[in-house]
Image (cartoon, rainbow, N blue to C red):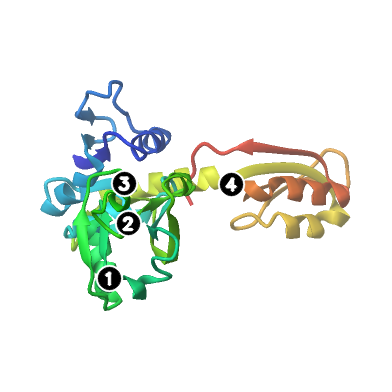
Amino acid sequence: MLRIAVPNKGSLSGPAAEMLHEAGYQQRRESKELRIVDPENEVEFFYLRPRDIAIYVSSGRLDIGITGRDLLIDSAADAEEILPLGFARSTFRFAAKPGTANGVEDLKGKTVATSYEGIVEGHLADNGIDASVVHLDGAVETAIELGVAEVIADVVETGTSLRNAGLEVFGEPIMKSEAVVIRRTGADAEDPKVQQFLRRLQGVLVARTYVMMDYDCRVEQLEKAVALTPGLESPTVSPLHNEGWVAVRAMVPAKEAQRIMDDLYDIGARAILTTAIHACRL
């Protein structure tokens, strides 16, 4: 049975559970549940603190896990990313009072407060910067006001909380993070159970990215229509009862669907429909 670690709380928890549900897996009904078994899919889920998941996976006690790329790197655990999941995206950056620094090269001799000392220490070392790193659990914005540090390093989404604290981001992003599937470094990459799990999640990602488009068009306009909707392999084309007309079906990127519908209409296509894709395998 495949043993999988899932975030039990925070910004990763809800989207992870939703994706797993869309992939056909049972999920817990109560937030207090720490373990559930999905016998039909031969999977056992363990609901753990997101920050601990990389440690559990690296130990080999669990086969794979879902966590944040930032948490994986910060843990320094013997685990690796195998599939990005596209949610819980964030950017990790330095911030300070205006005029303190313009880039990482200005941090020499300064003190940096963060909840992710593993990431920050690694980034400073990569850039040859000798600076002190202070670990704080949350609310790092107050570290500068209270004199604990001159600079902070934290996840930045809108930047509103930093501006409210009189701080501004500077320099290049330290890293960009999102939810990822991880496994122990060196684990069997061809494990059929793991590959099936990854295929299901990849199917959800594709289903969220594409829609199915159906339309009718004149035969003489078919080549132009197919150029607009090439599909993943090629579109399905079927003759209609009315001579000279065909029905076309193809997957198209969801974000481009409205533009494609307009272009198809302009070349004479009619009865243009889009439908959501709930699951797929490529």
Residue drawn at (29%, 68%), measured in percent from left and top?
Answer: 123
State the SS at label 2: strand
Horizontal relation, residue 243 to residue 84: left or right = right
Which residue does the numbered mark 3 point to in the structure image? Answer: 142
Q: Are marks 2 and 1 in contact (CB under 8 Å)?
A: no
Which residue does the numbered mark 1 point to in the structure image? Answer: 124
Q: Amino acid at mark 3?
A: Thr
Q: Nearer the viewer, mark 2 or mark 3?
A: 3
Q: Are marks 4 and 3 in contact (CB under 8 Å)?
A: no
Q: Amino acid at mark 1?
A: Leu
As drawn, 207 above or below 27: below
Q: CA distance from mark 1 to mark 3?
A: 22 Å
Report which quarter residue 148 is drawn in.
bottom left
Q: Are marks 2 and 4 in contact (CB under 8 Å)?
A: no
Horizontal relation, residue 70 to residue 176: left or right = left
Q: Does residue 198 appear anywhere in the picture? A: yes
Q: CA distance from mark 2 to mark 3?
A: 9 Å
- In the foreground, 55 or 127: 127
Give how far across and how far down residue 255 sits, in percent.
Answer: 64, 48
Residue drawn at (45%, 61%), measured in percent from left and top?
Answer: 98
Q: Nearer the viewer, mark 1 or mark 4?
A: 1
State the SS at label 1: helix
Q: Assign the N terminus to one quadrant of the image.
A: top left
Horizontal relation, residue 211 to residue 94: left or right = right
Q: CA distance from mark 1 to mark 4?
A: 40 Å
Which residue does the numbered mark 2 point to in the structure image? Answer: 152
Residue drawn at (40%, 45%), measured in percent from left and top?
Answer: 201
Q: Amino acid at mark 2?
A: Ile
Q: Nearer the viewer, mark 2 or mark 4?
A: 2
Q: Nearer the viewer, mark 1 or mark 3?
A: 3
Q: Are marks 2 and 3 in contact (CB under 8 Å)?
A: no
Q: Earlier in the sequence, mark 1 or mark 4?
A: 1
